[in-house]
Image (cartoon, rainbow, N blue to C red):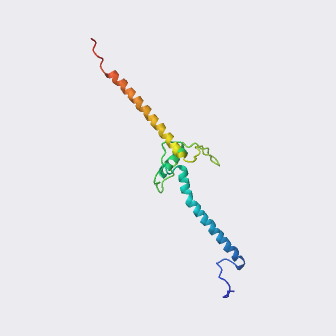
Amino acid sequence: MSTSTEKELPLGTTAHYANMHKWLQRGLFVCLVCLVIEASFSLPFIAVWMGWPTLSLTEVCHEMEKVRFADDSRECQVPHPLFAPSEARGQKTAKDTWGIQPRPHYKKIGFHDLIRFRDERLAREAAAAKLRAAAGAAGAAAAGAAAAPAPPAP
């Protein structure tokens, strides 16, 4: 069947379908190249959307954890241990509706919202620390006034 004038076809390809296989191969190659290019631009764009120039990638991860689980004490495990359970194991603070199609109830994250969320949380923590310090100073002043001896009467 093979003569010197016939083209060598790939294994499993008949002469009748050779042209179709050639165009399928070219189309799939173009699709794979487009997927690689898309994926290579996704991480930088998402990082900038989340607030990368202001926050490091680790801080972005920490803030995402805080938003996802509605828990200001959450932190990412960096680097995540290789065979450890997932970070969310045993987490009870997430406000999601579970079912066939789970619905998250965390805040929608827009452009640089993680920066705003972090700044608001830091302001709340600073205000709480200031109130604790003021209450502690007032309590110490009251305790000091009670412990001081009364001046002698003339």
Q: Is residue 20 left or right of residue 75?
A: right
**Residue occupying the far top of the picture:** 154
**Percent position (x, y) of residue 76?**
48, 49
**Percent position (x, y) of residue 31?**
63, 65
* Number of marks: 0
Q: Residue at x 70, y 76 (%)?
A: 19
The N terminus, quarter of image: bottom right
**Percent position (x, y) of residue 5?**
68, 87
Note whether residue 19 is visible. Answer: yes
Give the answer, above or below, for where 135 lies relative to 1: above
Q: Is residue 83 left or right of residue 98?
A: left
Give the answer, above or below, for where 128 lies relative to 8: above
Q: Residue at x 47, y 40 (%)?
A: 122
**Percent position (x, y) of residue 71?**
51, 42
Q: Residue at x 49, y 52 (%)?
A: 57
Q: Is residue 12 left or right of residue 82?
A: right
Give the answer, above or below, for where 46 lies relative to 149: below
**Residue occupying the far right of the picture:** 16
Note whether residue 76 is visible. Answer: no
The C terminus, quarter of image: top left
In front of the other: 15 or 113: 113
**Residue occupying the far bottom of the picture:** 4
In front of the other: 12 or 22: 22
Q: Residue at x 51, y 45 (%)?
A: 115
